[in-house]
Amino acid sequence: MKIESVDFYYLSIPQVLDIGDGSQDALLVRVQADGWIGWGECEASPLVSMASWNCPMSHSACKPVSASVLGQVIETPDDIRRINRLVRTNCLDLLQADHTLSGIDIALWDLLARKRQVPVYQLLGYERAYPKIAYASQLFGDDPQGTLERGRAVAAAGIRAAKFGWGPYGHGSPELDADHVHAAREGLGKDCRLLVDAGTVWFDDVERAAKRLEALNQCDAVWLEEPFVSGALEAYKGLAVRSGRVRLAGGEGCHNFHQAKNMIDYAGIGYVQIDTGRIGGITTALDVVRYAESLGIVFVNHTFTTHLALSASIQPYAGLKHHELCEYPFAPSALGRDLAGTGLSPDANGLVRLPETPGLGIEPDLRALREYQQTVEIQVNGRTVFASTRL
């Protein structure tokens, strides 16, 4: 079968706020081939990704993503890998291409698995999908009291791990940050795993980050995530040797295998966090899983958006029993909640299980999404090169 069409749908809540919540908008991708449909999602700025699909060719290494996808044969997983490589070759100088490719790649795995009537993880070579311990991913409160209340809400929901990130953390004094971390621990209780995400707030300043380590160790935080920007390998390594029991986590900013490999090899991280919607889809995430596992680095999904993205992000390491943590969007926007008709809710033991239905096992709720769809038209010299279709 051949890829006949790829459709992009820009979705957004009415007012996007300046907060670290990636669920406020979304770029939904639909791929069609010989009557089969697959769904994917890009973790990226929707308009920029839509432009990278349609942009005029600048030269041989800067072609639109569409030139490497439409009309391609898709019969086996090797075809998906071939298309993935072709996009990267033809879009070498089109930096947004990796994010656009990610949603397409996810949709191709969904489509092929639907055709074969198996879950995606089986196409990846796993015999079974192990349940993952959901960690509730949410923002720090505006003040320590707000963080305390959010921790209590997680504990009341029966979740066994929780991550607090962004918000005011890292922007004020080390003492205020310590108050937030202690409040989070108090709210969660002593048995819930505590994770902290600094959101790259210290850029590459090791000394500023190191001032937060004492509170993290006192509160038994499992990891400190993204203290620095992705690629600041020396800074990561410098902090890792001083971090005590707290391990460093990072990698969500990687958008190809080699960037993730560098994080694993040189940053001193204990956890590598990969977003299938950024790195090049399920294909590239699987490569990172295999490399991380070979070196004893724990793989963790990254997703803070929808349950479609959540399912896609778990598939690459679904068959690894001891890579057990799973980021779970605990308090997404209305769009994040409404995108999928059926979600992946943690069970009574705080575990997330992948659907055993064909593909990703997630169906977008098209009727609910119509109120979020943004109409897009892209013109060049008065000629329409892209016009969005209605869901």
Image (cartoon, rainbow, N blue to C red):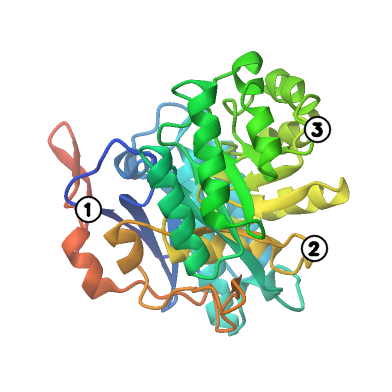
Residue at screen point 30% across, 50% down: 25
Q: Amino acid at mark 1?
A: Ile
Q: In this orientation, does residue 228 appear?
A: yes
Tag on residue 61? none
Tag on residue 13? 1
Q: Earlier in the sequence, mark 1 or mark 3?
A: 1
Contact between marks 3 and 2 (CB within 8 A): the answer is no
Left or right: where 125 falls relative to 294: left
Tag on residue 322? 2
Provide residue 51's location: percent of width, then percent of height.
32, 39
CA neighbours of label 3 inside 10 A, class few (<14), some (14 to 19), many (20+): some
Q: Amino acid at mark 3?
A: Asp
Q: Amino acid at mark 2?
A: His
Residue 103 vertical placement versus 242 (above, below): below
What is the distance, in whole Å, between disc 3 and disc 2 at their CAs?
21 Å
What is the distance, in whole Å, between disc 1 and disc 2 at their CAs?
37 Å
Provide residue 351's location: percent of width, then percent of height.
61, 72
Provide residue 57's location: percent of width, then percent of height.
39, 33
